[in-house]
Structures are given as C-alpha cells and as structure tokens.
Amino acid sequence: MTQTLDKMDEFERLLEESFSKSYSVADIVEGTVLKKENEGYLVSVKGAKTEAFLPNKEISSSAENTETLEIGDEREFYVLKEENDEDGMVLSLKRLAYAQAWAQLNDAKVQGDTILAKVVSIVKGGVLVDVADLKGFIPSSQLRTGTPFDGLIDTKIEVKVLEADPKKNKLILSQRQAVAEQRDQVVDNILSELEEGQVVKGEVVRIADFGAFVDINGIDGLLPISEISWSRIKHPSDVISLGETIEVKIIKIDNELKRISLSLKRMGEDPWQQIEGQFEEGQVIKGTVNKVTGFGAFINIFPGVEALLPVSEMSNENVNPFNQFKVGDSVEVLIKKFTPQEHRIALSIKDINKDAE
C-alpha cells in the first residue's frame, strides 16, 4: 500500500512538472489577472508553479496612460524577475510596452516606414523627440531646416528610423529622409499645378548664406538672397526667420530638374521703375556707401537702388577704394550712365571735379 502511494505521489510530481515551464528574465508570457492587491496584481501565468506578481509601478511608464486591469483579463506580460523556490515571478507591462516599441521601431527601420515623433526639446547638435514613450534624437543635419528653432517644440513631425538599438538605448531619426521620400512621390503633381508669376504661400524651412528654402505645397523652392530684398542685406535671416510663413512669387520652374526659384522682393514695387524720370545722366546727386570692393564701391542712391562707382571713376590718380571710402559714408556723385531698364547706373566722382575745373 505504501509503495502504491509513493508511486502515485511520484506520478503527480512528474505530471505537474510536465505542465510547468521555466521562464527567464525578458521572456514574454501569457497570463490571467486573478486578484487586485494594494501593491499590485496577482497573475496566473501558464506553466508557472506559483502565482506571479505585477507591481503597480510596472503597469505603465506614462503619466498620461490611465490603463486599468480587470479581474479575468488575459494578456501578455514581460518577465522582470524569474520564479524561484521561495517567490513567484515578477511581471511588467511597462517593460512589455518598451520591448514592443523597440520591436516596432526596428520593423520600421527594416521596412523603411515613416513614423510620427513629437519634438520635446532642443539640445546640442539637434532635438530630442518622443516616440511611443521612447526618447529619440534627430541630429541637426537630419532636420528639414538644417538647424533647430523654437517653433519645432511640441510639434509632431514625420521621420525615418536611422538606428534603433535597445541595448544602447539609442534611437536616431531623420526628418530629412521622410521629407525627401514625400517630395519624390508628389513633386510632378505639384509642379503641374504651379506656374511662373504665380504668388504662393510657403514656410521657410531652411536658411543658408546664399538664400533660403521655402516649402511650397511639399516642394522646397529656392529663395536666393538676391531675391529677398531690393536693398542689400548681409544674410537672409536679416529679413526672414525659420518657420515663418511668407508670400513669394514664382519666377522660374525647371520641370526637368524639379526646381522652383522664388522671389520675395518682387512682391513689392520695383524701385528701379520708381526712379525713371527722377534721375538723368549728368546729374549730381548724394548717396550712401553700402559696400566697398577692390573694383569699386556700391552707392545707395534711392531705397532699394544701388549704383556702381568704379575705382577708375573715383579719381584721376590710382587709388585704393578701401582707403577712399567706408560703409556708411555720404558721397556726392555724378550719374555717368543711367539705364534703369537694365537695373544699371554708373557713377563718377572724377567727372564732378573735371566739371569744376
């Protein structure tokens, strides 16, 4: 009789072990919520010898997530601590979401999918973003604007995944690649709807020394520095800002190269047309030095109108323009050649002195 009971106990033990499983940290397990306690929930995990525990702090990583668990809920959990002879497993939903988020980001990288990211702050070298409760980084070189600006904060932007490494907690993203892909998909349709001379609204998305790029319905149009203002400016940022919406005129469309050239200054009246009839050749006028070069000086004679005073017209003697003038100097000059239709005026000082003699 005793031997029979021992055999039955052994059979029950072997039967129990055959249905039990050994889980390790980071495993994803299936379980059922059994009971709510002060510090968390008791969970029945398939194959586990004892009940597992889900602490309250491991339910969610987001303060905005108000997820609640109901008794009887069946779902997946992340193993935070292994089961042993004394204690059951410790589970986490927070780490499950974390693992799933990294898996989704890796899938997006492999498949080349575009995802949404929320810009949370500007840091050295780029911006930090939130993606599914994970922190990511967009280098300045991968921003559409090429540099961060305050208007980006709290906005949601489309990005591509460049690198997703959960072991290093490293998530690198690119807005520029996402924008380039969108542009390639719509550029022909957008260009067909635009025409030269048309006035359009756009957002300034990048500023460089040579000009600015303006988003026109998904295409970046070039606004050269020479087309920003009729007056001489040192840098485009003297007139426009990143993220600013401006009205511009389309001055050229290159369908072959898929490029648009824009003008801001032509939205206003051309000052060269205003000066017709106001000046004539041989007239002596006053102007202000705007720029000095080795070949001469540029003189502002009317708002938005510059005329060239060549070095050969400064004096009968050989002179160095940099020794003769500095920016801001007021000078008296003679109009030697006046062709406003070509946006050209040639000036002279030595001819004034010649007339005086």
Image: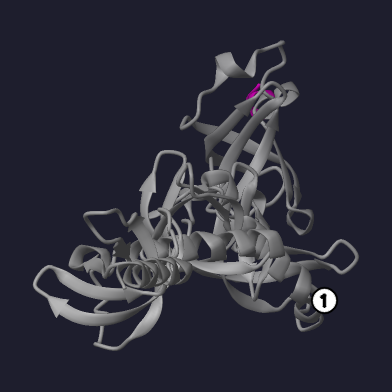
Compared across the picture, whether 318 is left or right of 7 comes to: right
Q: Is residue 257 left or right of residue 245?
A: right
Q: Position of residue 111 (x, y in %)?
A: 70, 65
Of all residues shown, which one is farthest toward the right?
256
* Between 169 and 325, the one nearer to me in the picture: 169
Q: Nearer the viewer, residue 74 or 15?
A: 15
Residue plotted at (46% across, 39% down):
125
Q: Badge 1 local density, few (<14 within 10 Å), some, or many (20+)?
A: few
Q: Position of residue 317 (x, y in %)?
A: 71, 11
Q: Is residue 160 visible?
A: yes
Residue at left offset 28%, top offset 75%? 43
- From the top left corner, tell me how far across and down residue 262 is, in percent: 69, 64
Question: As drawn, which residue projects farthest toward the front?
Answer: 1
Q: What's the amino acid at mark 1?
A: Asp
Q: Quadrant of the C terminus?
A: top right
333, 104: nearer the viewer: 104
Q: Position of residue 233 (x, y in %)?
A: 54, 45
Point out the image quarter for the N terminus.
bottom left
Q: Nearer the viewer, residue 292 or 116?
A: 116
Asked which secondary structure carries label 1, the reply is helix
Q: Provide the major secondary structure of the magenta segment.
A: helix
Work out whether residue 271 can be spotted.
no
The residue sitting at 28% across, 81% down in the picture is 33
126 w.r.t. 273: above or below: above
Q: Is residue 354 magenta?
A: yes
According to the picture, the residue beneath numbered tag 1 turns out to be: 188
Q: Does the magenta segment cover residue 234? A: no
- Farthest residue to the top: give it: 318
Location of residue 42 (image quadrant): bottom left
Please provide the residue range marked out in magenta.
352-357
